[in-house]
Image (cartoon, coloured by chain):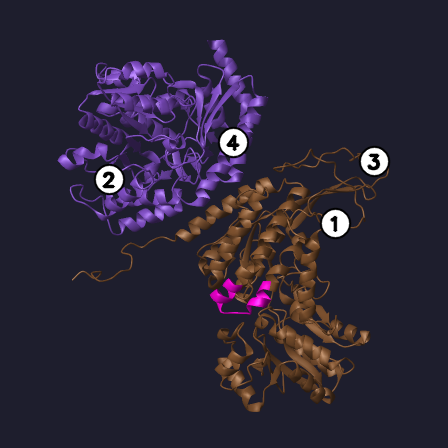
Chain colours: A purple, B brown
C-alpha cells in the first residue's frame, strides 16, 4: 500500500485509474501509449523515483524549473524560514520581500528598471504583451512559428495553433508569426510600423532548441528599434544561467526592452515569475500601477525563494559548474554521435541547453522511451519530435554526468530498434 | 509592543549558506580532478612550478598577513617557512614520478598511479599559509584537487592565498576548481564536509579534537597527533653549539611548529656549562619564583593558555608577571619532575622550554619516555651528542618516528635542516594515533593500480614498449609509452619558472645556515 497520510493507494495502477477517471484521461493515456509508465513519487537532487521505486535521472527539469535539482536543501530551508514569518502577502501593498527581490532581479540586467511579478511564465508574458501595447499604443504582436510563450489569453495566441485553435483562442489578425531565423520575414512583418512587440525565446525550447543564426537576434532587435516595435526576450527556459550567463540575451549581446522569466525562478518549490522592463516600458506603473493585479503574483514566499535562487546562481561555484557540465556534454555527446551517426545526427548546444537531433520525424520519441527504460528521463520537443530536449541542471556533479552518458550509450541499441520499427510501420 | 522594534537581528531564521556553498565547491573540485587526473607529467610539473613561483613571490605578503591576522609567530620566520614550502618542496619531489605508469618486466607487473581525488585539507592558525602552500603542492604533484578549511583565525590570509595559487595554476594550464578555500569556516561546517562521500581523503592538521573528528568522519584521513619533543644534550658534545641550535629552534616563529623542543633533558654534571651556553644564546633561565608565575599563567587549571601560542618570550614573561631583558629569545623553566604533575612538561607552542636534569643517560631516556607517555607519542625528539650508540639507544627506546640529531628540532623534524621530507604534516603513526608514521608527501595521495601477470614463466607478459598512457592534458603531447623502471638520477628541474632557481636555492640555504649556524 502507498500510504501518504492524507490519502492512500493500493497500487500504481489505482493511481492511473483515478487519474483517468478524475484528472486528465488524455494526458494519462498518452504516456501509457508512449511506453512511459511514470508516476513520480519521491524526488531528490537530479533523481526522480517512480512509484515502483525505480530511479530516473531527470534531464527534463520541466524546462529548467528544477535547475538546482529537486528539493535543493538550501532552498527548502529558505522556504521553511519564510513560512515561519510570511505568507503569500497582500499584492496591493508594497512589501519587504517584493522590494528586495525586485531590486535583486533588476540589478542582474543592465538597462532594466522595474520587475513586475506574476505566478507563472504565461502571466509574465501576458504582462509583457500588455505593457508593449500600453507603451506603443499598437495592438499587433509578432512571434515566431513554433514559438512557445504559455497558454493564457494573449500568450497562447502567440504560439502554435495546436494550443490556440482548440480553444478558439487564435487571433490571426492581431498575432502574426514569422519563420525563425528569417530576418526578411520579420522585416516585412514590422515594416508597417503597427506592431507593438516582437516576442521570441532566446533559443526556442518547445521547438527543440534550434540555435539562432549568427547575428539573427541582434538583427531582429535592430529591426524592432527601426520600426518602433518593442523587443521582448522570453527567458523562461534560457535564463537563470542555463546558457552560461544569467540571461540568455546577455550572451548574445542584446538589449531587450523587456524580458520574461519563470520556471526555475521559484526553485521548483514555489511558483513565481517576472517581467522585467526598462524605464521606457514602465509608464503604466506610474499612470495606474493597479492596472494589472494578481493575487498570487509576486507572492512574498515566492519572492524570498526567488531572491535566494538569484543569489545562488551568482556564486562563482555555480558558474564554474555550468561550464564543466556544458563542456563535458559537448565532448561526450560529440563522441557518441560519431559512433551512432546512423540515428544520432545533430547536437544543438548553448551552455546546458541542448537539443539532440535524431534521424526520424518522431525520432526523439523513441529515444526518450529507450532512455526511460535505461533510467534517464528526457523529453522530446513537442513541436519538433526529431529533437530530444537534453537539459542538464546547473549543479550536476561529474559522477552523475558520466552516468547519464553511460546509460545513454547503453540505451542506443534499444533506440535503434525502436526507430527501425517506426520506419517499418511508416 | 512588538518585540523586534529595536532589534537588528534577522527576523527570519536564515539557513546555513556556507555548507551549501562548500558542497558546490566539492562538486567543482570533482570536475577539476576529472580533467587533472589525466594530465601528463610535464603539464603537472609546469603547474607545480607555477604554483610554487606564485607562492614564493607572495611569501613576505602572507607572512605579514598571517602574523597580523592571528597574532602568532614572527614575520621573518613565516616568510622563510612560506619560501621553503614553495620551490624547495617541488625540488624535493622532482625525482618522484607519480604520474607515469611503471613497467616492471622482471616482476611482470605494471603499476598505474591513481590520484586520491578531492582532498579536504585543514590548516591551523599557527602555520596557516605555509601549510596551505604545502598541501596545495602535495595535491598538485599527485594530480588531486584540494579544498581548504582554514582555521577561522586565519581565514582571510588563507582565502587570499588559495585564490592566488589557483590563478597561477589555471594560468599554467590547470583546470579551474583545483585549489579552493572555504570562506566562512566553522566547526559544524568542517564536520559536515569531512563526512561527505565526495571527499576522498582528509589531510587534518590542527588540534587533537579536529584530528580525531577527521578519523571519526567515516572517510579516509591522514591526521597527525600533537608533538611534545624531548631534547637530550649529551655531555660529550659542544654545549654551545647545542644551546644555539635549541634556542634558534625554540625562538623560530615563536615555537608554533609542532616539532619544536618542549623539554630539555641534560645531565646534572653539565648543568652550569649548559646554562652558560643557553644564556649566551639569548635564553632567560627563570628562577623558582618566575617558574611558578610562568606555570600559573601558562597553564591555568592545568591547561595551556592559548593566548601564549606563538607569542614572544618577552611578552609572555610580562604577562606572567616578571621582566626579562628585551633581547630574550626564549624562557627556560627548570623543573624537578616531568609528566602529568608538571604542566610545563606538556606541549607549549610558545618559546618556553622546560629543563630537567638527571644523573645518567639511561635516566634521561626514561624521562623522555615519561614525557612522551603523557603526550607527543609518535612525533619527534632531538638528540645532541657524538656517540652513535647513545643515539641508537635513545631513538630505539622512544615512541617517536623521527629523532633529529645535532640540528634544531623545529626545522629538522619538518625536513628543513635535515634530509627528512619537507613537511607540515609530521606523521605520528600508530604510536600517535595516525595512519602514517613519516613526513607526509604527495606519494601519500596516490594509490597504484597494479596489473599483475601470472607468475608462471610459461605465461608471457605483453610488450609495453608502444602502449599509450592515458594522458589527455591541455597541452598533452602525443601520448608517450610508459617508461620502464629505471634508477637514473632525477632530471634537472626545468628552468621555466622565470627565475634563477640556483640563486633561489642558494638564498634559502644561506638563510637556513644563518638559523642553524654552528653545526652545519
Is B181 placed above or below B321 here? Answer: above
| x, y percent for residue A118 | 24, 35
| x, y percent for residue A319 | 44, 41
* Residue picked out by circle 3: B459
- The magenta span reads B64-79
Q: Earlier in the sequence, mark 1 or mark 3?
A: 3
Does dot 2 land on a helix, a strand or a loop? loop
Which chain hosts label 2?
Answer: A
Q: Are marks 4 and 1 in contact (CB under 8 Å)?
A: no
Which quadrant would residue A263 be assigned to in this image? top left
Q: Are marks 4 and 3 in contact (CB under 8 Å)?
A: no
Which mark is drawn over residue B492?
1
Which chain hosts label 4?
Answer: A
* Residue picked out by circle 4: A329
Which mark is drawn over residue B330?
none
* Residue depicted at x 59% and y 60%: B82
Which chain hosts label 3?
Answer: B
**Real-space CA distance between mark 2 and mark 4, rounded to the nearest whole angstrom:** 36 Å
* Residue picked out by circle 2: A298
The furthest residue to the right: B457
Amino acid at each position: 500500500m502507498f500510504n501518504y497520510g492524507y490519502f492512500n493507494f493500493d497500487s500504481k495502477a489505482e493511481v492511473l485509474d483515478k487519474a483517468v477517471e478524475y484528472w486528465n484521461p488524455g494526458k494519462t493515456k498518452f504516456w501509457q501509449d508512449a511506453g512511459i509508465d511514470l508516476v513520480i513519487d519521491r524526488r531528490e537532487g537530479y533523481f526522480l523515483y517512480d512509484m515502483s521505486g525505480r530511479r530516473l535521472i531527470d534531464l527534463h527539469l520541466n524546462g529548467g524549473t528544477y535547475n538546482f535539482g529537486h528539493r535543493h536543501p538550501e532552498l527548502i530551508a529558505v522556504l521553511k524560514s519564510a513560512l515561519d514569518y510570511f505568507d503569500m502577502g497582500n499584492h496591493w501593498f508594497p512589501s519587504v520581500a517584493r522590494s528586495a527581490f525586485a531590486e535583486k532581479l533588476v540589478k542582474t540586467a543592465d538597462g532594466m528598471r522595474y520587475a513586475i511579478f506574476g505566478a507563472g511564465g504565461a502571466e509574465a508574458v501576458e504582462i509583457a504583451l500588455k505593457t508593449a501595447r500600453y507603451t506603443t499604443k499598437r495592438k499587433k504582436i509578432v512571434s515566431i512559428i513554433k514559438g512557445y510563450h504559455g497558454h493564457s489569453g494573449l500568450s497562447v495566441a502567440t504560439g502554435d495553433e495546436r494550443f490556440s485553435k482548440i480553444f478558439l483562442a487564435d487571433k490571426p489578425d492581431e498575432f502574426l508569426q514569422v519563420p525563425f531565423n528569417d530576418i526578411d520575414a520579420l522585416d516585412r512583418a514590422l515594416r508597417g510600423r503597427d506592431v507593438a512587440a516582437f516576442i521570441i525565446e532566446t533559443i526556442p525550447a518547445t521547438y527543440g532548441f534550434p540555435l539562432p543564426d549568427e547575428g539573427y537576434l541582434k538583427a531582429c532587435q535592430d529591426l524592432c528599434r527601426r520600426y518602433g516595435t518593442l523587443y521582448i526576450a522570453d527567458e523562461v527556459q534560457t535564463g537563470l544561467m542555463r546558457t552560461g550567463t544569467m540571461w540568455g540575451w546577455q550572451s548574445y549581446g542584446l538589449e531587450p526592452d523587456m524580458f520574461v522569466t519563470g520556471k526555475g525562478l521559484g526553485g521548483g518549490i514555489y511558483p513565481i515569475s517576472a517581467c522585467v522592463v526598462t524605464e521606457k516600458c514602465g509608464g503604466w506603473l506610474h499612470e495606474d500601477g493597479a492596472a494589472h493585479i494578481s493575487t498570487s503574483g509576486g507572492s512574498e514566499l515566492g519572492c524570498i525563494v526567488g531572491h535566494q535562487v538569484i543569489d545562488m546562481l551568482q556564486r562563482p561555484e555555480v558558474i564554474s559548474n555550468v561550464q564543466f557540465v556544458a563542456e563535458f556534454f559537448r565532448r561526450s555527446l560529440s563522441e557518441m554521435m560519431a559512433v551512432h551517426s546512423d540515428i544520432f545526427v545533430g547536437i544543438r548546444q548553448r551552455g546546458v541547453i541542448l537539443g539532440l537531433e535524431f534521424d526520424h520525424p518522431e525520432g526523439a520519441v523513441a529515444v526518450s522511451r529507450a532512455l526511460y527504460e535505461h533510467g534517464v528521463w528526457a523529453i522530446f520537443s513537442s513541436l519538433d519530435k526529431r529533437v530530444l530536449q537534453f537539459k542538464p541542471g546547473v549543479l550536476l556533479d561529474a559522477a552523475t554526468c558520466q552516468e547519464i552518458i553511460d546509460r545513454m550509450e547503453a540505451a542506443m541499441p534499444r533506440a535503434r530498434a525502436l526507430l527501425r520499427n517506426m520506419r517499418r510501420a511508416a | 509592543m512588538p518585540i523586534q522594534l529595536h532589534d537588528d537581528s534577522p527576523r527570519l531564521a536564515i539557513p546555513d549558506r556556507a555548507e551549501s556553498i562548500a558542497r558546490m565547491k566539492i562538486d567543482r573540485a570533482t570536475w577539476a580532478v576529472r580533467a587533472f587526473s589525466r594530465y601528463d607529467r610535464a603539464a603537472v610539473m609546469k603547474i607545480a612550478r607555477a604554483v610554487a613561483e606564485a607562492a614564493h613571490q607572495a611569501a613576505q605578503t602572507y607572512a605579514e598577513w598571517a602574523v597580523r591576522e592571528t597574532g602568532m609567530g614572527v614575520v621573518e620566520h613565516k616568510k622563510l617557512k612560506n619560501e621553503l614550502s614553495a620551490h624547495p618542496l617541488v625540488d624535493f619531489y622532482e625525482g618522484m614520478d607519480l604520474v607515469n605508469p611503471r613497467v616492471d618486466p622482471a616482476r611482470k607487473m605494471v603499476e598505474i598511479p591513481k590520484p586520491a581525488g578531492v582532498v579536504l585539507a585543514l590548516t591551523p592558525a599557527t602555520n596557516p599559509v605555509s601549510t596551505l602552500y604545502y598541501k596545495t603542492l602535495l595535491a598538485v604533484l599527485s594530480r588531486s584537487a584540494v579544498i581548504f578549511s582554514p582555521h577561522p583565525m586565519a581565514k582571510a590570509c588563507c582565502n587570499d592565498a588559495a585564490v592566488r595559487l589557483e590563478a597561477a595554476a589555471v594560468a599554467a594550464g590547470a583546470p579551474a576548481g583545483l585549489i579552493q578555500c572555504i570562506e566562512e569556516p566553522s566547526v559544524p561546517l568542517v564536520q559536515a564536509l569531512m563526512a561527505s562521500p565526495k571527499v576522498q581523503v582528509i589531510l587534518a592538521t590542527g588540534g587533537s579534537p579536529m584530528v580525531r573528528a577527521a578519523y571519526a568522519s567515516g572517510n579516509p584521513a591522514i591526521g597527525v597527533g600533537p608533538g611534545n619533543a624531548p631534547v637530550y644534550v649529551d655531555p660529550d658534545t659542544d654545549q654551545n653549539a647545542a644551546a644555539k641550535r635549541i634556542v634558534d629552534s625554540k625562538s623560530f616563529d615563536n615555537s608554533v611548529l609542532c616539532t619544536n623542543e618542549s623539554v630539555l633533558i641534560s645531565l646534572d654534571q653539565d648543568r652550569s656549562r649548559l646554562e652558560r651556553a643557553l644564556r649566551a644564546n639569548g635564553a632567560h633561565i627563570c628562577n623558582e619564583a618566575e617558574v611558578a608565575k610562568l606555570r600559573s599563567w601558562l597553564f591555568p587549571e592545568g591547561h595551556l593558555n592559548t593566548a601564549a601560542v606563538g607569542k614572544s618570550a618577552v611578552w609572555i614573561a610580562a604577562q606572567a608577571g616578571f621582566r626579562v631583558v628585551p633581547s630574550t629569545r626564549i624562557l627556560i623553566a627548570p623543573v624537578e619532575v616531568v609528566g602529568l604533575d608538571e604542566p610545563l612538561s606538556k606541549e607549549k607552542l610558545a618559546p618556553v622550554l622546560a629543563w630537567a636534569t638527571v644523573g645518567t643517560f639511561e635516566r634521561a631516556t626514561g624521562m623522555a619516555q615519561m614525557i612522551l607517555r603523557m603526550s607527543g607519542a609518535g612525533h619527534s625528539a632531538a638528540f645532541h651528542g657524538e656517540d652513535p650508540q647513545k643515539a641508537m639507544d635513545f631513538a630505539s627506546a622512544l615512541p617517536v618516528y623521527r629523532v633529529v640529531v645535532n640540528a634544531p628540532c623545529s626545522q629538522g623534524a619538518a625536513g628543513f635542516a635535515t634530509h627528512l621530507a619537507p613537511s607540515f604534516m609530521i606523521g605520528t603513526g600508530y604510536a600517535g594515533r595516525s595512519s602514517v608514521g613519516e613526513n607526509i608527501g604527495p606519494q601519500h595521495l596516490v594509490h597504484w593500480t597494479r596489473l599483475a601477470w601470472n607468475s608462471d614463466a610459461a605465461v608471457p607478459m605483453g610488450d609495453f614498449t608502444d602502449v599509450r598512457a592515458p594522458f589527455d592534458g591541455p597541452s598533452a603531447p602525443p601520448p608517450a609509452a610508459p617508461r620502464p623502471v629505471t634508477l637514473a638520477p632525477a632530471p634537472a628541474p626545468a628552468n621555466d619558472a622565470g627565475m634563477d632557481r640556483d640563486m633561489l636555492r642558494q638564498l634559502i640555504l644561506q638563510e637556513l645556515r644563518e638559523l642553524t649556524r654552528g653545526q652545519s
